[in-house]
Image (tube, rainbow, N blue to C red):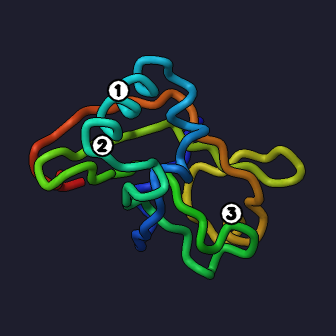
Amino acid sequence: MAFDTSQLDQGGSLSLDDITPLIDQSPALKREVTAAATKAGKKPERIICAGMRFSNRWKELGGARVAPYTCKFADDRYLKIRATVRLTGDSGKVFEKPTREAMRNASHISETKPVWSWAKDDPDW
């Protein structure tokens, strides 16, 4: 069961460095990201990404970012990463939608199974 992040109503910026745990799940993605950052002459903390953001209505998760992510390596080089996002509460309950119960009780986010593609233009999610 996965959480549908398209139902979140805010976006937010973060650095590529912030999503390293997701990138590190795939050796191929990690190699591609390292090569693209080297080619762009940028360190991961200097590469800006955008992700979906939990609003302050989420008691424990307000401000957290989740996939999908778009990262700008250069004016003509963008990375798009999607992932399976799972929200759980302290009791282990899984939340699939942004319900009032989820906003009160979801406290943990996990992102797995990254899927990515490269684009020359800023992708329209």
Q: Nearer the viewer, residue 101 or 29?
A: 29
For marks 3 and 1, give the CA distance. Answer: 35 Å
For marks 2 and 3, give the CA distance. Answer: 27 Å
Residue 118 % position (x, y):
21, 35
Provide the residue designation for mark 1.
32
Q: Nearer the viewer, residue 31 or 98?
A: 31
Q: For the residue marked with disc 1, what is the amino acid?
A: Glu
**In the rendered view of the protein, which quadrant contains the C terminus?**
bottom left
Q: Are marks 1 and 2 in contact (CB under 8 Å)?
A: no
Mark 3: secondary structure: helix
Pick out the residue farthest to the front.
41
Residue 36 % position (x, y):
29, 35
Mark 1: secondary structure: helix
Q: For the residue marked with disc 3, what is the amino acid?
A: Ala
Q: Is residue 94 left or right of residue 65?
A: right
Q: Say which quarter of the image contains residue 82.
A: top left
Which circle, 3 or 1, is nearer the viewer?
Answer: 1
Q: Earlier in the sequence, mark 3 or mark 1?
A: 1
Packing grade of label 2 (10 A; few <14, some 14-19, many >=20) is many
Say which residue appears at 41% left-offset and 58% top-offset.
46
Q: Are marks 3 and 1 in contact (CB under 8 Å)?
A: no
Q: Earlier in the sequence, mark 1 or mark 2?
A: 1
**In the rendered view of the protein, which quadrant contains the N terminus?**
top right
Mark 2: secondary structure: strand
Packing grade of label 3 (10 A; few <14, some 14-19, many >=20) is many
Q: Above or below — where is 55 with respect to 69?
A: below
Say which residue appears at 40% left-offset and 32% top-offset.
34
Say which residue appears at 41% left-offset and 18% top-offset.
28
Q: Which mark is drawn over residue 55? A: none
Q: Which mark is drawn over residue 80? A: 2
Q: Which mark is drawn over residue 102? A: 3
Q: For the residue marked with disc 2, what is the amino acid?
A: Lys
